[in-house]
Image: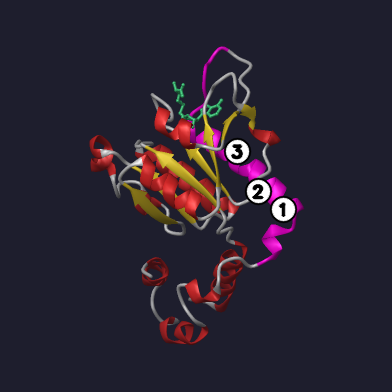
Amino acid sequence: MSPERYQRIRQVLERRQTDLTVCLENVHKPHNVSAVVRTCDAVGIHRVHTVWEKKYQFRRGTAMGSQQWVRQTNHDNINDAMAELKGQGMQVLVTHLSDTAVDFRDIDYTKPTAILFGQEKYGATDEAKAMADHDIVIPMMGMVQSLNVSVAAALVLYEAQRQRTIAGMYNTQQLSARHWPFKMGTLVCISFVSAKVCHCRLLIH
Ligand code: SAM
């Protein structure tokens, strides 16, 4: 790994927003999962949560490998996911189209926040909606009822990124160096290893 690449990885880790996350509830099409995870990386999300109920579990692992830089925690059910997110003091926002939902731009994303996106066809479950702190909607002015889930995720996450940039939250390191995948000394040891292997080391911790 070149010093330049190391510095780049370091910068990325320093900007990671550990108190901003996404929960994908039964979003199971690999290209959608990949697209969302890619956006998560782009806005500095460190970990995504997934809920894949039994009938979707054959997809597990299919898409997550496509994005090497974001960690993933899977939950067997929405109750477990909500308990963990709320236990971390996060406000949980569920994205869906309802008359009572608030415009996604009216939310304060500088608070610890988890944003839940629902399944491609059926949307978020009633359980998720009942447990969430707010329903948020991206206004739709055309004929189609909803956006592709990865497009919806990009819009909401970039609003969060915009607010957090203004608040200076990318200038404050949130991810403790203790949780970094490598230490300075280790870098010297692995500097001769191919980039691919280095990638693996970054992931396995
Ligand atoms: N028929 C489903 C429904 O009514 O929820 C549509 C599901 S939509 C294709 C898949 C996911 O994308 C939703 O669960 C939500 O997370 C997100 N989504 C799509 N369009 C949205 C919008 N306009 N506002 C908020 N979320 C949206």
- Give the residue number, with chain letter if any, for mark 1: 165
134 or 68: nearer the viewer: 134
Q: Position of residue 118 (x, y in %)?
A: 43, 33
Residue at image coords 68%, 35%: 105
Identified by mark 3, the residue type is: Val
Image location (x, y in percent) of residue 139: 63, 23
Q: Amino acid at mark 1?
A: Thr
Image height check: is 81 above or below 44?
above
Residues tagged 1 and 2 counted as in contact (Cβ below 8 A): yes
Give me the residue at 64% from left, 33% from top: 104
User: How far apart are the alpha carbons under marks 1 and 3?
Assistant: 14 Å
Q: Which of the two discs, 1 and 3, labels the residue nearer the N terminus? A: 3
Which is more N-terminal, label 3 or label 2? 3
Residue bearing mark 3:
156
Q: Residue furthest top?
A: 143
Q: Secondary structure at mark 3?
A: helix
